[in-house]
Image (spheres, rainbow, N blue to C red):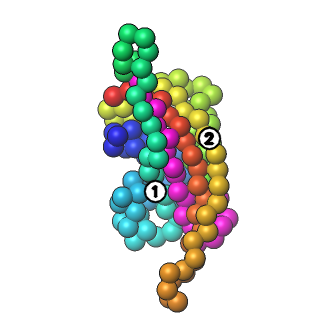
C-alpha cells in the first residue's frame, strides 16, 4: 500500500498552491518526525482503510484506499489553508482527470470525503500547541 501513498504525496506536491505553503514537508505518518523537524506547517498521510475491488469473474485489478491527510500548523488558520489547498487539488482531479500516473500507481478517481479539526495540546510546558486540520481522501487505483 505504500505505492498508493507515494502516488498521493507526489500528485499533491505537483500543486504550487500546496508547495507554496508547505514546501516538500509532506510524508507518510510513519515518517512524521522528519516533516515536523523541518518546520511548520507540514502534512502527514496515513491509510485508514481500503480493499481490493472484485467483480463476478475475479479481481478487477482496482483497489480503493481511504487516506487521512493531517495538515499541521502553528495556527488554526495555517493548518486550514494547507487543508483547503490540498482539497482543491483533489476536487479538481475528480472533475476532469480520470486517470493519471504517479510513480507506479494509476490513480483512477478520487473524492474528498470529509474534513475535521483536531487541535493538539502541548505535551510539556515547553511545547507549542499544534493545530491539525484533517482531510479524508478516497482514491481508486491500480498498480
Label 1: element kind:
strand
Residue 29, compared with residue 11, is above or below; it is below
Residue ID at (51%, 49%): 68
Q: Which mark is residue 67?
A: none
Left or right, residue 84 beside residue 26: right
Image location of residue 8, percent across then percent down: 44, 41
Task: Decide if residue 102 is in sight here.
Answer: yes
Answer whether residue 65 is magenta in the image: yes
Q: Which mark is residue 44?
A: 1
Left or right, residue 19 beside residue 114: left
Q: Which mark is residue 113?
A: 2
Answer whether residue 98 is magenta in the image: no
Choose top left, top right, bottom left or bottom right for residue 134.
bottom right
Residue 138, compared with residue 34, is above or below; it is above
Image location of residue 136, percent across then percent down: 57, 46
Magenta residues, as a range? Answer: 62-81
Label 2: element kind:
strand
Image location of residue 109, percent across then percent down: 52, 28
Instruction: Tell me, yes or no, whether the two marked residues, 1 and 2, touch with CB atoms within 8 Å.
Output: no
Residue ID at (58%, 50%): 135
- Find the distance from the CA under tag 1 to the CA under tag 2: 17 Å
Task: Decide if residue 11 is in sight here.
Answer: no
Residue ID at (35%, 40%): 1
Residue 15, compared with residue 28, is above or below; it is above
Left or right, residue 114 beside residue 109: right
Taking depth in this image into account, of 98 and 126 the one nearest to the observer is 126
Residue ID at (66%, 67%): 76
Taking depth in this image into account, of 60 and 56 the one nearest to the observer is 56
Amino acid at each position: 500500500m505504500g505505492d498508493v501513498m507515494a502516488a498521493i504525496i507526489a500528485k499533491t506536491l505537483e500543486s504550487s498552491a500546496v508547495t507554496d505553503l508547505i514546501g516538500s514537508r509532506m510524508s507518510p505518518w510513519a515518517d512524521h518526525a522528519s516533516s515536523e523537524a523541518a518546520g511548520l506547517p507540514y502534512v502527514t498521510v496515513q491509510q485508514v482503510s481500503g480493499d481490493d475491488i472484485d467483480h463476478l469473474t475475479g479481481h478487477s485489478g482496482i483497489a480503493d484506499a481511504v487516506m487521512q491527510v493531517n495538515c499541521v500548523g502553528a495556527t488554526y488558520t495555517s493548518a486550514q489553508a494547507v487543508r483547503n489547498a490540498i482539497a482543491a487539488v483533489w476536487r479538481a482531479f475528480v472533475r476532469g482527470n480520470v486517470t493519471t500516473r504517479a510513480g507506479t500507481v494509476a490513480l483512477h478517481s478520487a473524492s474528498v470525503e470529509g474534513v475535521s479539526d483536531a487541535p493538539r495540546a502541548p505535551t510539556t510546558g515547553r511545547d507549542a500547541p499544534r493545530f491539525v486540520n484533517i482531510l479524508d481522501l478516497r482514491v481508486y487505483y491500480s498498480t
